[in-house]
């Protein structure tokens, strides 16, 4: 019962992340329509690592038994929205690296959706899903820290949306609570990933608030 209660709370809270991502996309479009650099201060590293974080949760939700609808479909919406942001970054910068990252993530979405048809995953694939979570945790930490250093160096948050990171923090906290309703032997990668996200993105949000307050003085 607690699993379903916290799963529902986590899923509903995750809708705030959808909202935050949508706000980020709107912010980019507003800057573009104003003939300003639309992806200024946006770290490709940060959004690519965010994509991988959502994606690893998506795959983890598919891999476990039973399939966690609370994880899978909320993350599916998020990875599509982040994919739009990565496309916007590529559209603005037209670099080989941003094009590769966008293409890689787009292919990953297709592979992930197709993998649902191969459930239950064999043991090796489950191990792969856990390994992916660990790798993504490291990438998420470095990606978020990179974004923090970018805005700290420039002292401008640009198109970066505080609402996005506020919603992600709420999502991470509720997902952590949800993860603790599962057996620890199964859920520990989820706990590690979301715990790391709470710490690093919390620091990033604090830095964004500090910079915003300074600019208003």
Image (tube, rainbow, N blue to C red):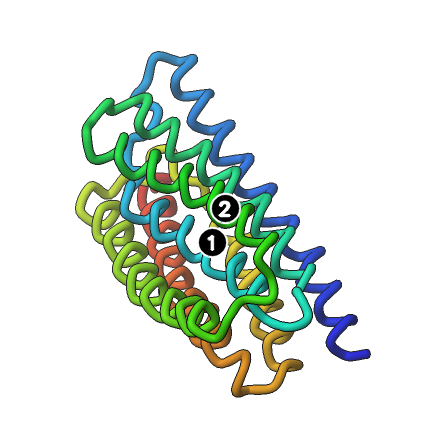
The N terminus is located in which quarter? bottom right
Residue at the image position 24 percent from the left and 22 percent from the top:
94
Measured along the vertical axis of the image, is residue 13 above or below residue 211? below
The C terminus is located in which quarter? top left
Camera-side residue of 97 and 156 = 97
Distance Cα–Cα, label 1 vs label 2: 17 Å
Label 1 sits on residue: 55
Residue at the image position 55 percent from the left and 87 percent from the top:
184
> Which x, y percent locates residue 175?
59, 68
- Mark in the foreground, 1 or 2: 1
Residue at the image position 42 percent from the left and 65 percent from the top:
197
Label 2 sits on residue: 164
Quarter residue 199 falls in: bottom left
> Which x, y percent locates residue 160?
39, 39
Quarter residue 121 falls in: bottom right
Measured along the vertical axis of the image, is residue 62 above or below residue 49? below
In what element is the residue under mark 1?
helix
């Amino acid at each position: 019962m607690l699993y379903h209660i916290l799963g529902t709370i986590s899923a509903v809270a995750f809708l705030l992340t959808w909202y935050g991502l949508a706000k980020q996309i709107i912010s980019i479009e507003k800057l573009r329509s104003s003939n300003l650099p639309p992806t200024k201060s946006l770290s490709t590293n940060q959004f690519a690592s965010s994509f991988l974080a959502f994606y690893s949760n998506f795959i983890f939700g598919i891999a476990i038994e039973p399939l966690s609808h609370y994880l899978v479909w909320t993350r599916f919406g998020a990875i599509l929205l982040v994919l739009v942001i990565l496309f916007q970054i590529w559209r603005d910068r037209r670099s080989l690296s941003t094009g590769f990252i966008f293409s890689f993530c787009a292919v990953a979405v297709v592979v992930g959706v197709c993998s649902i048809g191969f459930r239950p995953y064999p043991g090796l694939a489950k191990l792969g899903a856990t390994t992916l979570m660990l790798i993504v945790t490291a990438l998420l930490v470095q990606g978020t820290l990179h974004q923090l250093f970018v805005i700290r160096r420039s002292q401008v948050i640009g198109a970066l949306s505080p609402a996005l990171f506020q919603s992600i923090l709420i999502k991470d906290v509720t997902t952590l609570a949800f993860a603790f309703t599962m057996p620890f032997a199964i859920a520990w990668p989820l706990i590690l990933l979301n715990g790391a996200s709470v710490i690093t993105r919390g620091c990033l949000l604090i830095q964004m608030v500090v910079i915003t307050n300074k600019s208003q003085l």
